[in-house]
Amino acid sequence: MNEEKAAILKGTLDMLILKIVALGPIHGYAISQRIQQISKDYFRLQQGSLYPALHSLENRGLLAADWRATDTGREAKFYKLTPKGRKHLEAEMESWERTAQAVALILRTAQ
Amino acid sequence: MNEEKAAILKGTLDMLILKIVALGPIHGYAISQRIQQISKDYFRLQQGSLYPALHSLENRGLLAADWRATDTGREAKFYKLTPKGRKHLEAEMESWERTAQAVALILRTAQ
DNA sequence: ATTGACACCTCGCACTCCTAGGTATATAGG
DNA sequence: CCTATATACCTAGGAGTGCGAGGTGTCAAT
């Protein structure tokens, strides 16, 4: 019952992924772990959400990928931000701030 | 192009409506105006979102409604919170705070 | 030999809100 | 009087978005 592992807030997935990738080249599987870790285990990014999102971001030219070996000697697809992706991330973050503030305005309106 | 009137953030509509209704009995049409006004014209709540949401909230026992006359002498359906609705609103607001903070954690992670 | 973690993938669903239509009444302007 | 605008309600269908559930293959440890 106590749903302590929450789903990603709708509309924020692309932004969160772009932000994680902005920290440095990283492969998909590690992205979901990082999101979970940085959010202090609050968000749980499902693989069924992750991979389609990565493909979409790549198709839209916001991410670029190449296959490399991980620390553990395995092949993995590493993503990095394109310039377009960086711009997009900045725009999404600004939009998020404005939206979050608008929600806060409503929630903090006293009767 | 410059989409300065934003859509409601997915997943927050019920909460925002409940919060507005919590300020005092109010009819549907006025709810959308209040949301627009309090959010400083940032959110634009469409009628195609508003009315189905109100019916859903009523069906779930979170809102109760009765028809009354407005200031302008027109009949309108006034909603008020039920006790269940008030609890639900509090739970949703807490959940929102945690989610917004988790998003902030990720967005504010420096490389 | 089997389990579990790593690392990738896709299909179809469920949920959520919007678009685009509609009805009806009251008020203001020409 | 007639029309446009604002008020006030409604619905059907669709587009978007993330998830659940399934799958493949590799490597390390038991």
Image (cartoon, coloured by chain):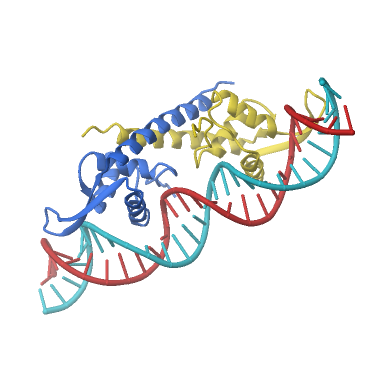
Chain colours: A yellow, B blue, C red, D cyan
Q: Is residue A59 left or right of residue A105?
A: right
Q: Nearer the viewer, residue B93 or C26?
A: B93
| Image quadrant in which you'd find residue B22 | top left
The residue that appears at 41% across and 29% down in the rendered structure is B97
Q: Quadrant of the C terminus of chain B?
A: top right
As displayed, is residue A12 above or below residue B57? above
Q: Position of residue A4 (x, y in %)?
A: 51, 30
Lateral position of residue C2 relative to residue A15, left or right: right
Is any atom of residue A39 visible in this view? Answer: yes
Q: Position of residue A44 (x, y in %)?
A: 58, 33
Tally of marks: 0
Residue D13's spot in the image, x, y percent? 48, 66
Above or below A11: residue A25? above
The foreground one among A97 and D29 is D29
Quadrant of residue C20 within the rendered picture? bottom left
Would residue B39 be visible to someone looking at this image? Answer: no
What residue sits 53% from the left and 37% below the top? A7
Residue B88 image position (x, y, % from top left)? 35, 38
Please tell me which residue lies in front, B14 or B84.
Answer: B84
Residue A60 in the figure: left or right of residue B36: right
